[in-house]
Image (cartoon, coloured by chain):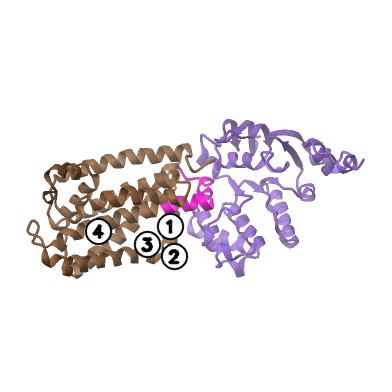
Chain colours: A brown, B purple
Amino acid sequence: MGINWIGLYTMVRREASRMARIPIQAFIAPWISALLFIFIFGSVVGGRISQIGGHRYLEFVLPGVLMLNIVNAAFIQASTAIYFSRFIKFVEEMLVAPLSYVEMIIGSLSVVVLRATVTGIGILLMGIGFGATHIESWPMFLFWIVSVSTVFGLLGLIVGLWSKSFEQLNMPVVFLLTPLSMVGGVFNTIEMLPAKLQWLAYANPFFYFINGIRGAMIGFDEAPQGLGIGLTLGLLAVLGVTAWRLYATGYGLRE
Amino acid sequence: MTPALSISHLRKVYRSGTVAVEDISLTIPEGEFFGFLGPNGAGKSTTIHCITGVAEPSAGKIEIFGIDAVKNYREARRLVGLCPQEFNVDPFANARQIVDWMGGYFGMGAKARKERIDYLIERFDLVPHQKKQFRELSGGLKRRVVLARALINDPKLIILDEPTAGVDVELRRVLWRYLAEINKDGRTILLTSHYLEEVERLCRHVAIVSKGRVVREGTKDEIAGSPGGLENAYLIATGAEPDHVAGQ
């Protein structure tokens, strides 16, 4: 049996319709947050900090801010969509339809990537508008948006299947995503950290995502891009297989 | 001839350890109008969930028109339409979207979908309500939307889990007429209902389940023809006391 393209497209249409019902939460909030970062780090703090690697502080910070918003958008989109559909039980509409588990996952991830890309492009345009950034490599910029949003989309699906309450749904954001992303080199270079703590940054996957998109945007990086790409592809493989396995066994989906 | 639905020794044990279906075997020929009766908790909905993929069978085999419903679930599900007992619907979507999305999941093209939706919306008197959010509709209208959704892919096997619960007499009659019509056209229907007059009126074959097992099965005439009619046969089969016994 071939791929159910119309079914896949329907999943995208459906989630796009849900996003259209919540434009403030989906897009306006991250854009306003990025605008505030541009103001604070461009005018208030940025003027008092010397250049980093030949770049103004705002130029240095903005790629990290963009990545933070992509991570949040991807995780929240995937986790809330699957959790809400389980909670209200309309996930059963997909279960009774002729959709394969891979199609269900790809359908969900397509919307995740769409939301993350719109969020990221919006922030990029604001940055360009304020003269705060530019793009060194479009292919690498798109690679980082698509791959990182897919990684956190998959993580969001897994958490959305595992969660039994809204409290549990928010736990990874509070205890994992926000702390790791904040210490992942958004606001500082590794050199700025005490020597004894620098290994912590290298052990933090967020460092490689931020380093990657910073390299694609302003051409500044602190670690080989290949290492970040390898790590991201590895995470995609592990999380992809885990999500597929959960769908195939019906974990959190079927009784 | 390949039966529309064949269930062999179905067993379902939930993760909690609850045995919802002990051992159910059924064969429903194509074109049958089959009544599936039993008290609450007897295992009717769980059986339906196992047929349609909402629940995973613990043991046994289910075939839909000869296709294994677990191994070849995609092929099998193309042939089935389910109207569930509960409203498992996005409450913020409008009536038309709900039916449309289901058609999309079934791989129906835009033109075929539009024609089918227009027909069903008209048929179930949903025209003035099609743009309203599901949560704004009355109970009866919600039931109509869920019915239209179940029929969007023009399924060969239609499974209706208490489709007339909480609906008015008018819709019940509209639905009865429609079901009789599509059954006459060759569609196979599996109906669960607590309204015995509905089953007597529509079904030609009846199975009564209790505690996860089929405790009586036969043609409606056989079962309803016994003294006291279908109600009496149902009460005896499920271990409840018929009125004339309870009153003694």
Quadrant including the C terminus of chain B: top right
Q: Is residue B106 visible?
A: no
Q: Horizontally, is B141 left or right of B98 in the view? A: right
Marks 1 and 3 close (CB-CB < 8 Å): no
Q: Residue beneath label 4, please?
A: A66
Dot 3 or dot 2: first in sequence order is 2
Q: How many labels, in total?
A: 4
Kindly report the distance in space between the C-alpha atoms of the residues bearing marks 2 and 4.
Answer: 23 Å
Identify the residue under disc 3.
Answer: A26
Secondary structure state at the residue bearing disc 4: helix
User: Looking at the rendering, in which quadrant would you find the N terminus of chain B?
Assistant: top right
**Residue A251 against residue A146 in the figure, above or below:** above
Q: Residue at x 32, y 38 (%)?
A: A238
**Magenta stretch, residue numbers:** A79-100
Numbered badge on residue A21 = 2
The kind of residue tagged 2 is Arg
Q: Amino acid at mark 1?
A: Glu
Residue B188 position, x and y percent, is 67, 44
Find out whether residue A83 is within the magenta segment: yes
Residues flagged by tags 2 and 4 on a common chain: yes
Which residue is label 1 attached to?
A: A15
Question: Mark 2: which secondary structure?
Answer: helix
Mark 1 in CB contact with mark 4 (< 8 angstroms): no
Is circle 1 on the same chain as circle 3?
yes
Amino acid type, mark 4 = Leu
- The location of residue A156, given as percent across then percent down, is 38, 48
> Which comes sooner in the sequence, label 2 or label 4?
2
